Image (cartoon, rainbow, N blue to C red):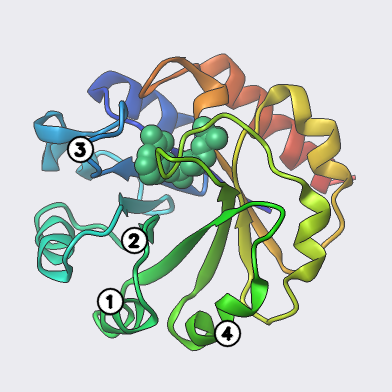
Amino acid sequence: MKIKICGLKDTNNIRQVSEANPDYMGFIFYPKSPRYVGQELSKDTLETIPESIVKTAVFVDESVENIMNKVNNYGFEAIQLHGDESPAICKELKEQNLTVIKAFAIEETFDFTKLIPYETHCDYFLFDTKTPAFGGSGKTFDWTLLSQHQLVTPFFLSGGLGVENLDAILKLKNDKLYGLDFNSKLEDAPGLKNIQMINKVLDTIRNYEHI
Ligand SMILES: O=C(O)c1ccccc1NCC(=O)[C@H](O)[C@H](O)COP(=O)(O)O
């Protein structure tokens, strides 16, 4: 199971999280988010992250031009799209050799057939709790809805994942579940991750997988 830590912005904290060795680290380029990296993120900081960790840039309805500027400036390998981005935009970005993660805001009435046109243009889906802020709600959604995902694209589970629901997460059975995306539940303040909690999550999940 891949583990993604999302919403980092403090230079020292980025170094500490990378030393904990998650599989993915996410940086938010949505100015309205309290985790917006803004000017605080330097290329030098990103270059200290080991190559084994996939550096992921997160956007909400950003233009392809602006996305590619960030990709080229910072060397991101993956992009995560949290707005109403079309399948055509996903296709265009995938053609740039980027790993494309398309996020969908899940609620009771979510229509999983909406995923069909995205299927060939995304590497992964990310199922997050629907929120007006587009992400970082700290709330889980009803995971039984995941059985409605009948396509082949693997997905990240997201939304309110933390130490307190690790037991429930490990009981999940879904052969398309590829990764777990952690954010606000592992923070001391928006964008400032708690390293003890991150180590607890990584150790628990990785030890469980070795049983
Ligand atoms: O975290 C944000 O502030 C955010 C804002 C706008 C778009 C995306 C955002 N986060 C992206 C993520 O991948 C989060 O990890 C995901 O929304 C889950 O967050 P949480 O419920 O806090 O675990």
Q: Is residue 41 left or right of residue 19?
A: left
Ligand 1 lies in quarter: top left
* Residue annotated with mark 3: 31
* Residue annotated with mark 1: 93
Amino acid residing under circle 2: Ile
Q: Which one is earlier in the sequence, the residue at label 2 or at label 3?
A: 3
Q: Which one is earlier in the sequence, the residue at label 4 or at label 2?
A: 2
Label 2 secondary element: strand
Crowding near the residue tagged with mark 1, few <14, some 14–19, many ≥20 C-alpha atoms within 10 Å: many
Crowding near the residue tagged with mark 4, few <14, some 14–19, many ≥20 C-alpha atoms within 10 Å: few
Residue closer to the observer: 25 or 29: 29
User: Residue at left 11%, top 61%?
Assistant: 66
Q: Which one is earlier in the sequence, the residue at label 1 or at label 2?
A: 2
Q: Which one is earlier in the sequence, the residue at label 3 or at label 1?
A: 3
Q: Which one is earlier in the sequence, the residue at label 4 or at label 3?
A: 3
- Tell me the CA gap for discs 1 and 4: 18 Å
User: Residue at left 12%, top 43%?
Assistant: 43
Q: Position of residue 164 (x, y in %)?
A: 75, 22
Q: Position of residue 17 (x, y in %)?
A: 43, 29
Q: Position of residue 2 (x, y in %)?
A: 61, 53
User: Residue at left 47%, top 34%?
Assistant: 136
Which of the two discs, 4 and 2, sits closer to the camera?
Answer: 4
* Residue annotated with mark 2: 79
Label 3 secondary element: loop
Amino acid residing under circle 4: Ile
